[in-house]
Image (tube, helix red, strand yellow):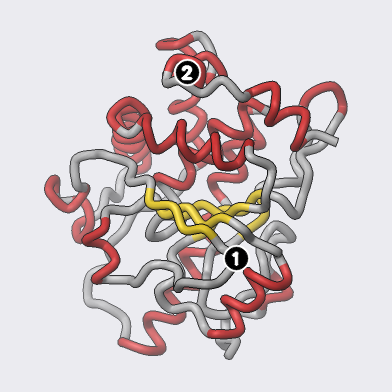
Amino acid sequence: MVFENDPLETLPPQFIPTVNVFNLRDVGGWNALDGKKVKTGQVYRSDNFGNATEADIDHVVNHLGIKHVIDLRRAEEWDESAKFPDVDGVEFHHFEMLHIKWESIGVRTSGITDEAELVKFLRHRYTGMMESGYHSVRDTLEVIASGEPVVFHCMAGKDRTGIIAAVLLSILGVDEEDIAADYALTSFGSARWRAWRDEHYGKPEVEGGLGTPAEAMRQTIAEINARFGSMERYADAIGFKGSDTLRDMLLQ
């Protein structure tokens, strides 16, 4: 089912045409080092698969050829939206990105309406998550470097997923503006999810959740660069030694 305000053909080309997975997209296609591009059809980022139809799962497994699914969420989040189903030939990895729950600081329902405050909040949260949840970043990069098609995701495919994508694309030499643009594409996925939610459950009195302003990712990258020297040095500091492997595998 395609919603009236959600024609799949109008989505940016990075998006994969699934119906009940709203923010699934290819990480490839961006310009990178030495005039090369990031390979498509190898690494994907996504929101959760809890509402996925059988056709959605079939598309992920048999069309995209995914061999690894990496879930960055807390196990308790599976009660709200189930994990990827058990499928022969697909290895499931649970790499929780450790962090203080956003719900604990009141932003899930109230939101932040001032963009400057939102950017500041997200920068602080993202850089904090990159330190407290570094095992998750490292382990995800290692699975990607194994060479088989992979999708990594959290709940909305926005924050935790955005961090992984930013580190990966930085290692591949993608420009910071393009990394920020990749992050901001989540706005399309969020709009798709809200349309689905409103149709199935009704529009809430208060709209929760936070946006994905590109400036938040720009500032996150700038702060990590200031702390570690570069995103690649951050990856090295957390124990990931496969940056050259990633470039050899994912640049073309």
**Helix, strand or loop for disc 2:** helix
Residue 230, image x, y percentages: 54, 14
Q: Is residue 194 visible?
A: yes
Label 1 or label 2, whichever comes before in sequence order: 1
Between 61 and 156, the residue placed more toward the observer is: 61
Please tell me whether mark 1 or mark 2 is closer to you in this view.
1
The residue shown at (37%, 83%) is 198
29 relative to 230 in the view: left or right: right
Q: What's the distance in space between the residues labelled 1 and 2, CA to CA?
A: 32 Å
Q: Residue at x 60, y 86 (%)?
A: 2
Disc 1 to disc 2: CB gap under 8 Å: no
SS at badge 1: loop
Residue 211 image position (x, y, % from top left) = 40, 52
Question: On the rendered image, what quadrant is the C terminus found in?
Answer: top right
Disc 2: which residue: 234
The N terminus, quarter of image: bottom right
Left or right relative to 49: residue 246: right
Say few, some or many: other residues with alpha carbon within 10 Å of mark 1 (under 14 / 14 to 19 / 20 or more).
few
Residue nearest the observer in this picture, 85 or 205: 85
Residue at which label 1 appears: 89
Residue 37: quadrant of the picture: top right
In the image, is 10 to the left or to the right of 221? right
Q: Which amino acid does label 2 sit on?
A: Tyr
Q: Where is residue 112 in the image (x, y as percent from the top left)?
A: 27, 48
